[in-house]
Image: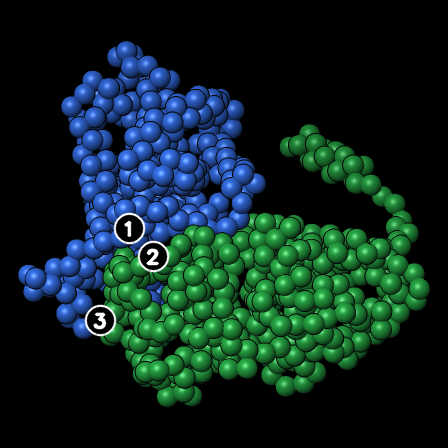
Amino acid sequence: MMELLPQALTDGILLGGIYITIAIAFSLTYGVMHVIDFAVGEWIMFGAFTGYYLNKWTGLDPFIFLPVIFVIYFGVGYLVQPVIHRVLSGTKGNPFLMGLVFTFGLAIMFRGLALTAFGFYSNSIPSAFSEGSFNLESIGLTVTIPTVRLMGLAYAVAITLILHYLLKKTNFGLGVRALAQHKDAAGLMGVNAKRTGSYVYGIYVGISAMTGVLLGCILSIGAQMGNEYTIFAFFVVVLAGMGYLAGVPWAALLLGLVQSIFMIYFNPSHTLLAVFVILYIILLISPRGLFGKGV
Amino acid sequence: MKFGFVRVLLLIAALFVAIPVHAEQRNFYKIGVITELSGDLVTGGNITKRGYDLWAQEVNAKGGIEVQGKKYQVKLVYADAQSNPAAGAAAAERLITQEKVDFILGPYSSGVTLAVAPVVDKYKVPMITGSAESPLIWKNKFKYTFGTIPPINFTGATSIKTLTELKPAPKTIAIIGSNDAFSKATAEAYKTAAEKAKLKIVKFSIVPSGQDMTPLLSAVRSMKPDVIAFGGHDEEHVKFVKALKQIGYTPKALLMHCGITDKAFTDAVGKDGEQIFGTTCWTGTAKTKSKVLWPTASAYAAASQKAFKNPGDYTQGGCSAAGIAFQTALQKIGAKPGMDEAMRAKLVQALEQIDVQTFYGRVKFATSGEFYHANVGLDPLTIQIQKGQIKTVGPKASVEAAAQYPMKEWKSR
């Protein structure tokens, strides 16, 4: 069974790559806006369907039009954010809970809309990258790396690096970090909370939509797919430490590796149980996530 | 606090005012339908809906169900089980106590059916599910629950037998099932049949529903089984095929169950669906003859194509056949709409006695044993997707085309 270990680790890392793409922008939006967006899975689903139809109409490979999807959904996010901002900045009741309820409602509404618009069948987005795989037998390892999943990992790394650059090396990033730390103080320093929030939410929705296209190439798409990904996004972000962006890739990789190793070496039906037990243990030891740096 | 309480009371009162209250004088059958119109199993739920709808449309187009010289139209009242057994049970309770339905057309999934069956027994309202296939339903011997699709342990064995008759005969098999009532039962049915056929089972795993199974399939690949058999639902079928292709492993035969007979599966996976085997008990090309509604399987497929731009699969067909079973039993006992408890009990007796040829094949419910109230009138079929078409490849008496075996490598398609 030990000869399976390299493959188990590879599968885990590739799975982790998928989880990074699902969770990283979700973590960003929580860090800045302090809203847990329960509609994250639905943004992923809308992106997936947009990719599916664009592929059908143009016949082009979905990886080519990822930037187009980003631009479209950045616009959508930019327009939706003021509504969420209004809910969150209310003075009555508990704005945080109102935000949760609002995004939860959005998710249900989006799912219903998608069922009506796209129908109930599952689908798949064809890509030239879905065809091949790399075999490492030539270097003595029985490991297969599917090209499309490798592309997914490359995309995850690219998104992480771009976000890192944006947050650490640009003035916009400085504003975002200031906003994440203290909204009022950032305002006094000249950071426009409303506009920055809109940009951040736009970036988050754009990235989530692109992730949807990727998932459509690797797995399958359907109007109900969002729910599953919302749970994983939430899970990774809690494990990483709420709002701690740098923890997301590690939490995602840990989740992927646990799942992969458990599926191969233990009883696969207990995979999710194992994942949750590990989460609980980590949170018991370090309540603010893997690195103790969550909000 | 006090004001809040008053507001709640006012809201409730407004709701009551909004509900139209009138004693119903019915000259039509009011039929409750509980199925999964949202949630994870929404695809299957909507396929059952199409089956029930098509039956109702056809009956009403012919003027209704003729009972003692008078025709009564049918009206379907839907309740969403939300792919959740508890929601399904609550929906059944509402349909029976508030909507006062005459009888019920049942859920898509076995899990929801198992939750609804005790409710219909409690209120003594007959139900036929046109879809659920877990043997557990029939082993529980619910008096008021019937089903038009045979249980998976009855149908699954046929496919394993067909595979063992291929040349050169496969020797090893890996069996994987998703963790829900139906899919688990499918995997277990394949396991029992494989053990009986002396196929060596190299892996048997049940995985949580909706999971990415790639790591597990990587482990399966290292065991190089001749056959991989999978029990799951529609979305999982698509994921399964894609994962196998991504890890580059082509077994000699890939066997799945429900869902692959629907056009949507071949649409989703394209040429990768080619040569996949499946288990079913009906296809649009089956050689059935009937005097009730559609005369043949192909006439049904054509009607479905016209209504839904889809020829329909065995689940949809099973649901339309459930309607025909009720229709036949109602006519047999002369039951008019608005049945009381005694009449509903008579309806159950009539259902136990019917033996009717439909476009779907023979419908005859078992009245004892492990298949109690399941349809045992059908012959299970093994099918294979060939050039995008569903072809029956076993058992020998029903063969439409020779089985293609072993499967073409993914990369050479």
Q: Nearer the viewer, residue A186 or A23?
A: A23
Chain B palette colour: green
Q: Give the residue pinned by disc 3.
A: B222
Q: Give the residue pinned by disc 1.
A: A130
Disc 1 chain ID:
A
Disc 2 chain ID:
B
Q: Is disc 3 in contact with disc 1, using a CB cutoff of under 8 Å?
A: no
Image coords of residue A273 (percent x, y): 36, 61
**Distance (Cα) linking label 3 and label 2:** 18 Å
Please tell me in which quadrant of the rendered image residue B242 appears. Answer: bottom left
Colour blue, chain: A
Q: Nearer the viewer, mark 3 or mark 2?
A: 2
Q: Nearer the viewer, residue A87 or A108?
A: A108
Give the amino acid at mark 2. Answer: Lys
Circle on res. B242: 2
Image coords of residue B94 (percent x, y): 72, 54
Q: Is disc 1 in contact with disc 2, using a CB cutoff of under 8 Å?
A: yes
Image coords of residue B8 (percent x, y): 69, 36
Task: Examine the rendered structure and indicate whether residue B21 appears above or below residue B110.
Answer: above
Tell me the crowding category of disc 3: few under 14, some 14 to 19, or many 20 or more residues within 10 angstroms, Cα based. few
Give the residue drawn at x 31%, y 66%: B408
- Horizontally, residue A27 falls left or right of residue A118, namely left
Give the amino acid at mark 3. Answer: Ser
Q: Point out the image quarter for the C terminus of chain A.
A: top left
- Horizontally, residue B168 falls left or right of residue B52, namely left
Label whose residue precedes the other's in the sequence (3 or 2)? 3
* Residue B31 visible (yes or no): yes
Tell me the crowding category of disc 1: few under 14, some 14 to 19, or many 20 or more residues within 10 angstroms, Cα based. some
